[in-house]
Image: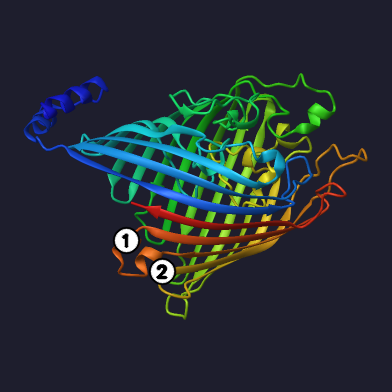
């Protein structure tokens, strides 16, 4: 009965099966079930974090608890996967935040997909709510930019063509609704809701529907030079410029500058040269063009020197990260759009200066050091100055804002407790500590240039 159900399910999903494949599916009666989950506990401390309006936020400290449970059913090449999640918070301060995201908040469907592997012996097909990330995650990595790290799924169809073990091509199509269209359990979430009723996550990031399609090719067949190439087409529906990070238009009363169905095309290449056993590089360049004369650029270049034979196995990286900008902020014609990547990015003390973490008008030369002081321990440090290559209009004195965002430093310490002991009950337990500092420059308003601080303690458990 189970094998018949699996075969019928595959046919209903429209997955083409050859006669041999159908026969093999019928012959194999085993159906495997698996389940698991994870728990993430965080306590965050912030002070004077920047905001997208060249100002700063006050002090906050709060706990956040995320729980996820998943189940998986596999039958030969078919896999059905579902994961539900919930995250609630407890704010010690600010007072105005104490009503947000309180227990139990909202239980939602975090993943729900069907996967068929090795179709025609070289294509994997994945349909449904899923996570996707390619390359260094600068283009595709987080489909739900409006809710932080609560979720990062895409509602998508993805085909992975496996030419061999080192060469793949992914073709995907994505449709992200502003609000979750699948059933949820818990508080009502609405932009107008108050207090404990809920918090408007704006799932797609900007209270708008977004959709697109793309190709991402990865080639690691040459050990001396790996490379990626990609193209992504995206449509952002009913874009309001003041919702997209440019409060300048709203200030100037230009609220008629909405953009409906704003289209962008992004093409890029990523090179990974290996110069020697210890020296490697990375170069990524992407161009973007779209409606109304939009054109923008993203670039990253870095060199990494790694010595595994030295004490603590140090890795040293010198790099520069750049996203183009415009004097009109994100509504400008030359401001970089993050496509489908709206992760925290460089750091928690940096991301809030961009609306919904949409990095643009950004230049960051920096140094990074990674160490392994003990087995299963990692220590990472990065630092550098940050700039806005283009002066933005709209300063209170009638002029432009400055171009120095500030000097930034970050330290992270992680330890895998589960691998440090033979105690079975600690398997899957890990801890992490993060500290960040940003000394603000003249990019920010006078009176809003206090040093920004961020601290985080995190405990995770996977089972």
Q: Name the side, left or right, on which 436 lies relative to 28.
A: right
Describe the element under mark 1 as helix, strand or loop.
helix
Mark drawn on residue 387: none
Categorize mark 2 by other alpha carbons within 10 Å: few (<14), some (14-19), many (20+): some
Q: Residue at x 45, y 33 (%)?
A: 107
Horizontal and vertical percent position of residue 182 = 43, 24
Q: Name the side, left or right, on which 421 lies relative to 153.
A: left
Quadrant of the rendered structure where residue 130 is?
top left
Categorize mark 1 by other alpha carbons within 10 Å: few (<14), some (14-19), many (20+): few
Q: Which residue is mark 1?
A: 425
Q: Residue at x 42, y 79 (%)?
A: 309
Q: Which residue is mark 2?
A: 376
Callouts 1 and 2 close, C-beta under 8 Å = no
Quadrant of the rendered structure where residue 23 is?
top left
- Can I make out residue 214 in this image? no
Check the image and name the residue furthest to the left.
27
* Tally of marks: 2
Horizontal and vertical percent position of residue 390 = 77, 45
Q: Residue at x 88, y 49 (%)?
A: 446
**Is 384 in front, or is 5?**
5
- Seen in the picture, residue 108 relative to 95 is either above or below; the reply is above
Horizontal and vertical percent position of residue 94 = 70, 45
Q: Residue at x 83, y 23 (%)?
A: 253
Precedes in sequence: disc 1 or disc 2: 2
The N terminus lies in quadrant: top left
Describe the element under mark 2 as helix, strand or loop.
loop
**Is 403 in front, or is 114?**
114
Horizontal and vertical percent position of residue 379 = 52, 68
- Can I make out residue 422 in this image? yes
**Is 64 in front, or is 55?**
64
Marks 1 and 2, how far apart at CA: 17 Å
């Amino acid at each position: 009965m189970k094998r018949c159900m699996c075969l019928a399910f595959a046919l209903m999903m429209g997955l083409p099966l050859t006669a041999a494949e159908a026969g093999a599916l019928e012959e194999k009666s085993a159906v495997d079930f698996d389940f698991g989950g994870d728990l993430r506990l965080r306590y965050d401390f912030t002070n004077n974090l920047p905001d997208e309006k060249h100002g700063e936020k006050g002090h906050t400290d709060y706990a956040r608890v995320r729980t996820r449970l998943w189940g998986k059913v596999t039958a030969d090449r078919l896999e059905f996967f579902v994961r539900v999640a919930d995250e609630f918070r407890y704010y010690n301060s600010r007072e105005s935040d104490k009503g947000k995201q309180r227990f139990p908040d909202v239980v939602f469907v975090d993943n729900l997909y069907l996967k068929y592997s090795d179709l025609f012996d070289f294509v994997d097909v994945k349909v449904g709510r899923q996570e996707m990330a390619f390359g260094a995650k600068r283009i595709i990595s987080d489909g739900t930019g409006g809710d932080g790290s609560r979720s990062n799924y895409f509602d998508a169809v993805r085909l992975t063509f496996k030419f061999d073990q080192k060469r793949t091509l992914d073709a995907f199509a994505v449709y992200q609704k502003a609000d979750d269209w699948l059933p949820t359990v818990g508080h009502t979430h609405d932009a107008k809701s108050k207090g404990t009723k809920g918090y408007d996550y704006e799932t797609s990031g900007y209270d708008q529907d977004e959709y697109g399609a793309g190709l991402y090719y990865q080639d690691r067949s040459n050990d001396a030079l790996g490379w990626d190439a990609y193209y992504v087409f995206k449509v952002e529906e009913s874009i309001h410029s003041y919702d997209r990070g440019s409060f300048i238009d709203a200030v100037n009363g230009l609220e008629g500058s909405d953009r409906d169905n704003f289209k962008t095309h992004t093409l890029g290449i990523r090179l990974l040269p290996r110069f020697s056993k210890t020296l490697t590089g990375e170069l990524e360049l992407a161009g973007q063009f779209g409606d109304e004369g939009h054109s923008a650029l993203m670039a990253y270049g870095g060199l990494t020197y790694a010595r595994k034979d030295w004490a603590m196995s140090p890795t040293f990286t010198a790099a520069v990260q750049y996203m183009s900008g415009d004097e009109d902020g994100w509504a400008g014609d030359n401001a970089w759009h993050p496509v489908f990547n709206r992760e925290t990015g460089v750091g928690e003390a940096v991301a809030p200066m961009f609306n919904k973490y949409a990095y643009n008008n950004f230049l960051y030369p920096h140094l990074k050091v990674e160490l392994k002081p003990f087995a299963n321990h990692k220590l990472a440090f990065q630092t550098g100055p940050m700039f806005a290559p283009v002066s933005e209009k709209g300063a209170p004195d009638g002029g432009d804002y400055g171009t120095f965002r500030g000097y930034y430093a970050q330290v992270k310490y992680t330890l895998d407790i589960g691998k440090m002991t033979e105690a079975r009950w600690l398997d899957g337990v890990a801890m992490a500590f993060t500290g960040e500092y940003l000394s603000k420059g003249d990019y920010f308003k006078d009176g809003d240039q206090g040093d920004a601080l961020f601290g985080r303690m995190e405990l995770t458990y996977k089972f």
